[in-house]
Image (cartoon, rainbow, N blue to C red):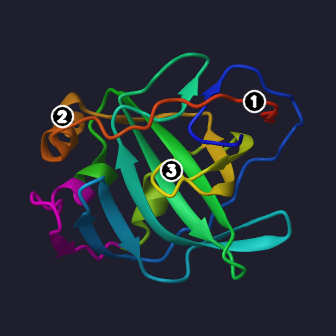
Amino acid sequence: MNQSPIDITNSLHAGLPPLQPNFQSASEDIVDNGHTIEVEMQGGSTFQIDGKTFELKQFHFHSPSENHINGQSFPMEAHFVTKDKEGDLAVIAVMFQEGAKNPALEQVWQAMPTKEGAKNPLVIQGIANALLPADKHYYRFNGSLTTPPCSEGVRWFVLKTPVTASKEQIEKFHHIMQHDNNRPVQPLNAREVIE
């Protein structure tokens, strides 16, 4: 009943303050796991929501985007996966639109493995923060993981402001994946999206 991703078409204006993630720690490795390119993080990057502290574990990419905004798909989407000490998950999603080359993304792409199962070291201080837009207002809803087991109970925060990536950067990711790696949008059912 609460599956992700969704098409965000109606939302309740709740005056939510912008997120304030403190993603200053360094990355550790970059992995091609066959589903996506995933950057594994060192400890210490956190954000607070609902009186809980969530720590950034990894971020990864989907092309085309999984979530849609007002019916619009984006060429790529990044998911910053965080977990609190109880094991609850929260995902911050960032949309990429085609435009100027993204310098932070380029640092990640330079180390991107080209074979499934391969892992390369990638130690860049503050790289997750560098990939986020300056404006951190968001849409919020309850959802799930978008890959098996698609477990529900995940807090989703889709940032409203996209960042850019060049056509070449988007194509490089697609070429290495060799397929679209997005899950189709799922029914909203009785859920409300707030902003």
What residue sits 67% from the left and 47% below the top?
143
Q: Nearer the viewer, mark 1 or mark 2?
A: 1
Q: Amino acid at mark 3?
A: Leu
Closer to the camera in the image, 149 or 114: 149
Q: Earlier in the sequence, mark 1 or mark 2?
A: 2
What residue sits 62% from the left and 34% below the top?
160
The residue lying furthest to the top in this view is 71
Quarter of the picture holding the N terminus: top right
Marks 1 and 3, Cα distance to the nearest angstrom?
30 Å
Q: Nearer the viewer, mark 2 or mark 3?
A: 2
State the SS at label 2. Answer: helix
Q: Amino acid at mark 1?
A: Asn
Residue designated by label 1: 189
What residue sits 50% from the left and 83% below the top?
43
Q: Image height check: is 128 above or below 53?
A: above
Q: Earlier in the sequence, mark 1 or mark 3?
A: 3
Q: Is residue 41 left or right of residue 106?
A: right
Q: Image height check: is 79 above or below 68?
A: below
- Quarter-of-image position of residue 82: bottom right
Residue 168, percent from left and from top: 16, 34
Classed neighbour count for the residue bearing mark 1: other residues with Cα under 10 Å, few (<14), some (14–19), many (≥20):
few
Q: Is residue 109 magenta?
A: yes
Q: Is residue 122 magenta?
A: yes
State the SS at label 3. Answer: loop
Marks 1 and 2, Cα distance to the nearest angstrom?
34 Å
Is disc 2 in contact with disc 3, using a CB cutoff of under 8 Å? no
Q: Which span is picked out in magenta?
A: 107-124
Classed neighbour count for the residue bearing mark 3: other residues with Cα under 10 Å, few (<14), some (14–19), many (≥20):
many
Q: Earlier in the sequence, mark 2 or mark 3?
A: 3
- Quarter-of-image position of residue 9: top right
Residue designated by label 2: 171
Residue 105, percent from left and from top: 30, 51
